[in-house]
Image (cartoon, rainbow, N blue to C red):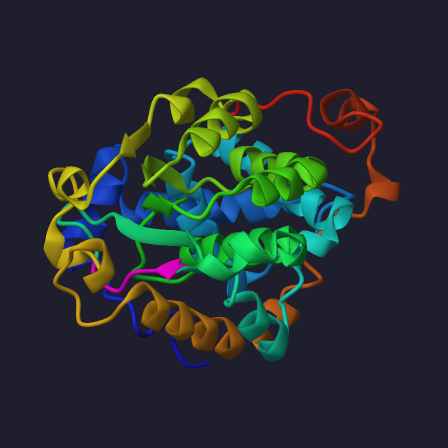
């Protein structure tokens, strides 16, 4: 299979080894723990049985869980569970649907990592969504975002840390009303990220936010986020403010950067990467929990009868 995310730069060998050093482990020790994880999965009647083909994914997942074997078990169970509970969040979109969505929102990973090996990802509401807010497909936004996180967690050489840049210049009352109407979808999206996909969010940069967007951030978004994520949200009222904390060589042209492309250009590139990964996503659809085989009732106490997590504080 060709390497996915091939258009993005990769961690150097030194940066990759630093991930192991940071959590006090080594590639050899992680591989031994991965064998233990597979053996544990074999004993769980409701979870899929992984083989050596998934060892690379398990290695990266374990590192993303700070090399905590027990923490990784919990995260993996949550990951397989949300795949069964909310499959609509993990279905790869068709190319046509993705192209149509890009008229309302731009977004995707940027090709150059930060010097510390963190991946930058951006999102921007377009001017069209301000005029046709009722056409905003929030679920598509969440699907594409989760799909990218899955890919980044799975692909060798990709970082396990991310910073987000969100340009909300065109966040109008119409967009606000649309977001509120689909707030349940957002809640589940956040739950998937916070308990099932252990990609580390280093910072969230909010750009060009009108007062309405700041109000939505504080009243509609922050209540669903863990405290540690809330503390990492930074607002910027200018490109100069962003450039003080994000190197310009890592930013696209229209964010005051030195990369050769614009946000729209990188949106199209991400669309191409997503389409190229369609078979990868389809081949992983078996990786989900069999909820009918859950051996005890602990699951219900954690997830709730309405399908929402009650315990979100998984570090």
Residue 78 in view, yes or no: no
Let me know if residue 111 is in the magenta part: yes
Residue 218 in the image: above or below residue 142:
above
Could you tell me residue 205's position as x and y percent? 31, 38
139 or 170: nearer the eye? 170
Left or right: 139 with respect to 145? right
Write the start and end of the magenta stretch as one range. 108-112
Could you tell me residue 222's position as x and y percent? 50, 24
Residue 12 in the image: above or below residue 47:
below
The chief SS type of the magenta part is: loop
128 or 281: nearer the eye? 128
128 or 314: nearer the eye? 128
Residue 82 in view, yes or no: yes
Hey, which quadrant is residue 195 in on the image? top right
19 or 176: nearer the eye? 176
Residue drawn at (60%, 46%), measured in percent from left and top?
39
Could you tell me residue 100's position as x and y percent? 58, 72
Residue 107 in the image: above or below residue 196:
below
Hey, which quadrant is residue 209 in on the image? top left
Could you tell me residue 268's position as x and y percent? 41, 74
Left or right: 105 with respect to 255? right
Residue drawn at (75%, 49%), measured in percent from left and top?
84
């Amino acid at each position: 299979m060709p390497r996915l995310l091939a258009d993005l730069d990769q961690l150097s060998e030194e940066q990759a080894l630093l991930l192991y050093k940071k959590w006090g482990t080594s590639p050899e020790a992680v591989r031994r723990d991965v064998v233990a994880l597979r053996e544990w999965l074999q004993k769980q009647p409701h979870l899929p049985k992984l083989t050596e083909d998934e060892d690379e994914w398990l290695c990266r997942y374990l590192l993303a869980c700070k090399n905590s074997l027990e923490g990784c078990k919990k995260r993996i169970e949550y990951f397989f569970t949300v795949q069964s509970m909310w499959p609509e969040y993990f279905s790869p979109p068709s190319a046509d649907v993705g192209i149509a969505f890009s008229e309302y929102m731009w977004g995707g990973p940027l090709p150059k990592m930060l010097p510390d090996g963190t991946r930058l990802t951006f999102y921007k509401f377009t001017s069209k969504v301000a005029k046709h807010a009722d056409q905003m497909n929030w679920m598509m936004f969440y699907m594409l975002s989760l799909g990218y996180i899955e890919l980044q967690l799975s692909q060798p050489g990709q970082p396990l840390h991310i910073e987000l840049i969100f340009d909300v210049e065109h966040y109008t009352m119409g967009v606000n009303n649309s977001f509120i109407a689909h707030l349940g979808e957002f809640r589940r999206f956040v739950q998937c990220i916070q308990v099932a996909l252990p990609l580390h969010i280093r910072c969230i940069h909010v750009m060009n936010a009108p007062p309405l967007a700041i109000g939505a951030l504080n009243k509609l978004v922050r209540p669903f986020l863990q405290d540690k994520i809330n503390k990492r949200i930074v607002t910027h009222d200018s490109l100069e403010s962003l450039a003080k904390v994000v190197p310009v060589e890592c930013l696209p042209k229209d964010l005051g950067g030195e990369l050769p492309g614009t946000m729209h250009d990188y949106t199209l590139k991400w669309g191409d990467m997503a389409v190229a990964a369609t078979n990868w996503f389809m081949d992983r659809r078996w990786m989900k929990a069999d909820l009918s085989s859950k051996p005890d009732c602990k699951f219900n106490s954690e997830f709730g009868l309405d399908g929402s997590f009650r315990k979100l504080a998984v570090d």
